[in-house]
Amino acid sequence: MHDITEGTYMELFLKDFQEELREERDVPEELRGYCIYQDGGKLLCPKFFNRMDIGNYLNHSDNANTVYKKGEGYFAKRDIKKGEEIFADYRNLGDQLGEPKEVRDEYYK
């Protein structure tokens, strides 16, 4: 929506961010990409699609334009232009995501 300057702190999820389980049929197809498929055909989705936090848009890349500083959060690694996708290197988040270190490199090729 706007340019982000190098070094800008980017809060991933606000304190009041909420998610809820929904039936797949109740979620418009174009919004399903912001949800996580769960057992039983349900989707874990943001409660309010019109108020999604940056964490709903973050994807993995080896050439991430953000950097995660443990205990501090995400920061712009370089200037990010309006409309450019925001990326993180998920391998740096493995401990936080509960992923074993030995499988990260293989999983995030």
Image (cartoon, rainbow, N blue to C red):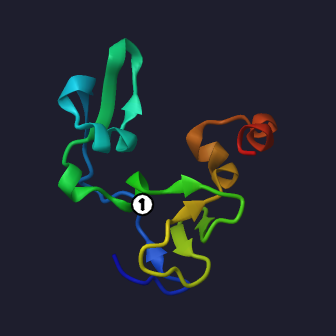
Q: Position of residue 40 (x, y in %)?
A: 35, 12
Quarter of the picture holding the C terminus: top right
Quadrant hosting residue 92: bottom right
CA neighbours of label 1 inside 10 A, class few (<14), some (14 to 19), many (20+):
some
Q: Residue at x 36, y 81 (%)?
A: 2
From this viewpoint, which residue is outermost toward the front? 29
**Residue at the extreme top:** 40
Q: Is residue 48 above or below residue 27?
A: below
Relative to the observer, which residue lies in front, 30 or 48?
30
* Quadrant placement of the N terminus: bottom left
Q: Amino acid at mark 1?
A: Leu
| Left or right: 49 in relation to 106 | left
- Name the residue rendered at 44%, 71% in the picture: 10
Residue identified by numbered label 1: 12
Can residue 62 be seen in this snapshot? yes
Q: Is residue 34 above or below residue 88?
A: above
Q: In the image, 42: left or right of 26?
A: right
Q: Determine whether 105 is above or below 9 in the image.
A: above
User: In what element is the residue under mark 1?
Assistant: loop
Please tell me in which quadrant of the rendered image residue 22 appears: top left
- Which residue occupies 33% across, 32% down? 44
- Rendered location of residue 39, percent (x, y): 40, 16
Q: Is residue 23 visible?
A: no
Q: How many marks?
A: 1
Give the residue at x 36% y 44%.
34
Please state which of residues 33 and 96 is positioned toward the viewer in this rendering. Answer: 33
Horizontal and vertical percent for residue 33?
39, 42
Is 18 positioned to the left or the right of 66 in the image? left
- Residue 25 on image: x %, y %: 22, 24
